[in-house]
Image (cartoon, coloured by chain):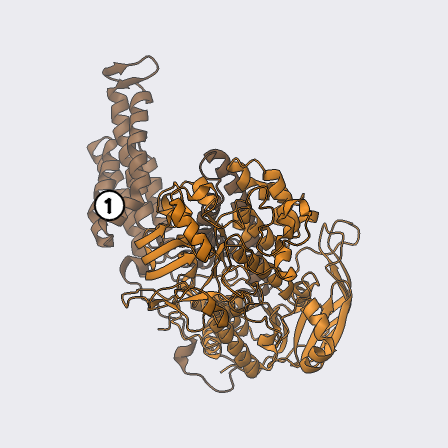
Amino acid sequence: MTTSTTQPAPSWRSEPPVRSERGIRAVQPVAALLGVIGLGICLVLSLDVVSAAVALGLELALLPLLRIPVRTLLLRTSPVLVAVPLTGVSIALYGRASGREWFDLGFAHVTDGSLVLAVATMLRVLAVGLPSIVLFIGMDPTDLADGLAQILRLPARFVLGALAAIRMMTLLGDDWRQLAMARRARGLADTGRIRRGASMAFALLVLALRRATTLAVAMESRGFGAPGRRTWARPARFGAREWAMVAVLVGIGLVSIAVSVAVGTWRV
Amino acid sequence: MIVPGAQAARIEFRDWGWRYAERDDWAVRGVDLVVELGERVAVVGASGAGKSTLLRAVAAVLPDEPDPDDDSAAAAEGSVLVDGVAPGSVRGRVGLVMQDPEAHTVMSRVGDDVAFGCENTGVPRGETWERVRSALDVVGLDLPLDRSTTMLSGGQRQRLALAGVLAMRPGALVLDEPCANLDPSGVQQVHDAVRALLDETGATMLVVEHRVGTWLDLVDRLVLLEPGGGVIADGTPADVLRSHGDALTAAGVWVPGAEPERGSARAPRPAPPRAGEIPGSVPGSTLAFRPLDEAGTRALPRAGEIPGSSAEPTPVFRPLDEGGRAAGCAAGHTAEHTAEHAAEQDLLVAEGLGTAQGRRQRVGSGIDLDVRSGQVIAITGPNGIGKSTLGLTLAGLLRPADGTLRATTTLAGDAGPAPYAWSSRELAVRIGTVFQDPEHQFVARTVREEIAAGPQALGISDTVERVGELLDAFGLAHLADANPFTLSGGEQRRLAIATVVATRPPVVVLDEPTSGQDRATWQAVVDRLGALADAGTAVVAVTHDRDLVRALDADEVVLSATGATPAAETRAPAAETRAPAAGTRAPAPATATNAPTEVTT
């Protein structure tokens, strides 16, 4: 890049800072996003046990490559791990009945057909849910925003607005704790949990709007939303690593379909 | 090096005025002001004089477009020009830095935040990073570009904002109370960064600050703005200070050289006060209490008398071991104490106290501290050292991470010794907390209900009387039916203190009670605190305000990376009349592990 500098600066000073991330963290998050969407599409095409099991098996085999500590892994995937058995039970009870009947409670039956469907669904939720969580653990929202804006060409206003909103979430968490402490300090925290929660939610809303207004002013004063082309200080590349990420994820989906078709369980 | 390509900007107001949408009154009107190329001007004036509005107009960030056809829409009159044209058409020429460092950091990494403005104005990538590095050099922020912005101190954040502005090569720098929320070292950092920036760019500067002394060495002109009256004084700082000193003070400006005297907000203490005595009875100091007097029948309480004590002790004034709360105290012991040191009872004792935000973020440790009735303790130290966390821990709101925090039986009564384990109602009558942001603690729709909320929750029978007294005492009677969220900053602060005092706790903890206030509001708050302490309440203030420490003649506890130590300058002459242990015990052990957030590598 050329500059209008009168005295030439050392060239390193015009380089974007080198990011220290290695391995999976260095892959542009948009690649993971696209890959997970591709995998998801592959997996919703069929409702059989085999394709979901193959996909999940492949994912579990690749999981150690991400080097995520077990504790973090369990903590982050806990929503999925809780949702999966619940989905399973409800489908086992209310899924389409076929084959041998195990229970009949009048409003709910458990049959061979509904049990198979339950297992298939559980595996499928895991197979889609697992990568869509683990690939984004430790992801930098800024990198995702850069990718969304520069690679997928989403509007900068929308992307940067969302990015700023994510940053504000931590501030709102602090606000919530302060609100709770303030109510305790004033003798209002012993009773009326629900009403108190409502009043705190209202106060949080007021504070959030106020913060958003300030931030909007700050962004505007730095030229955000000015007419003219916006440049991007951080390059967002979609290179070999990114294609590899997409290929692996979509590959998992395609392999699972192929196996399922081969053993004859594929059904649309 | 910053390229001297950016010319300084000329700012001109011609009979300018602005009215915000859905307001009846003009925020600012009739302003005629010209700031020539490269000139540096400080604007001062009372709260509500429209100083911020003025700056926002220059930076083209006023909300709403004026619409002459709609009465409820914003309205403008006259004109404001930057380089002869409307500010909105030269976006990027004017750089704005505002008060709240927390709220205006845009990106999550230092380098990205500085680059943000360049990106928006279409600067090529290579040049952007060059500008980012130069700007960080100029403001003296020697941090890696990928350092997280959440870990910065207030002073660092404001310098980051300055760097972000500088990278855009502005012709004018517009600063809206940039130092209001900073500790003294942060103020110095920002001042030096601004000076470096101005030296580098020769930019025009407009700055608004209550504590105008910070900027006097950098500005050429001082302009006094009157609410609705435009510019009433304009000249060199020395001239304006000399000829308009009184007007400036009246407008709430911190005129240099007119700082409060040590102990000026406390009643004089000729001798240790006797039980039941209001220390001193100088009209000025008791004024704050007068409304609490029974129906105001006596204008001034006589010395040696608690106002209203004939009927029933008023707990705010009541020596702490009188009345039902101190059930745990042996009677003889109590009498002995009240005779000797009514205002010097231990209420809270911290031993080897460690503090933490949440479960993991350990903040401070090894803190030894006594909180005594009638004592003012100022907890000071650099931003991010854990002052607020210590305050909240002392207030029974955060669980001590280490050591003990014990309430003496005088304070605890029939509740347990650990404030953190008290129920909300038990806590509210023992320790009150005023939060840094008053809006965090408002729960009601009107000011009156707000003050009543605490006493009502406690089932106190004379709630209505208490509310009436406090509304008068805190100058909020005319706002009784207003929504707390609509009050001005100073009014909110007074209300916050009133709501806490309403339950009459013997200990009041305040987090930065005076930050960002003009002189008048500051005086009102500090007078209240002094009066509370004089009446026997223990006041613990987390603060970086030297004037507060001095005016309240507070016992200072300085938090540093090596723990809490009593400052050398605590309790000047008056201290001699007090008990030797004034607040803190011996220096904290060397095991202290305060983690400063001022990161320099």
Q: Position of residue A161 (x, y in %)?
A: 51, 54
Chain painted in orange in the figure: B
Q: Position of residue B79 (x, y in %)?
A: 76, 67
* Disc 1 packing (10 Å; few <14; some 14–19; many ≥20): some
Secondary structure of the residue carrying numbered label 1: helix
In front of the other: B14 or B26: B26
Q: Is residue A255 left or right of residue B42?
A: left
Q: Is residue B357 left or right of residue B88?
A: left
Chain painted in brown in the figure: A
From where the camera sits, is residue B549 visible?
yes
Q: Which residue is mark 1?
A: A59
In front of the other: B124 or B182: B182
Query: Residue visible at 54% across and 79% down?
Result: B197
Relative to B563, residue A178 above or below: above
From where the camera sits, is residue A225 visible?
no
Parent chain of label 1: A
Query: Residue visible at 59% across and 64% down?
Result: A221
Q: Is residue B351 left or right of residue B11?
A: left
Q: Quadrant of residue A258?
A: top left
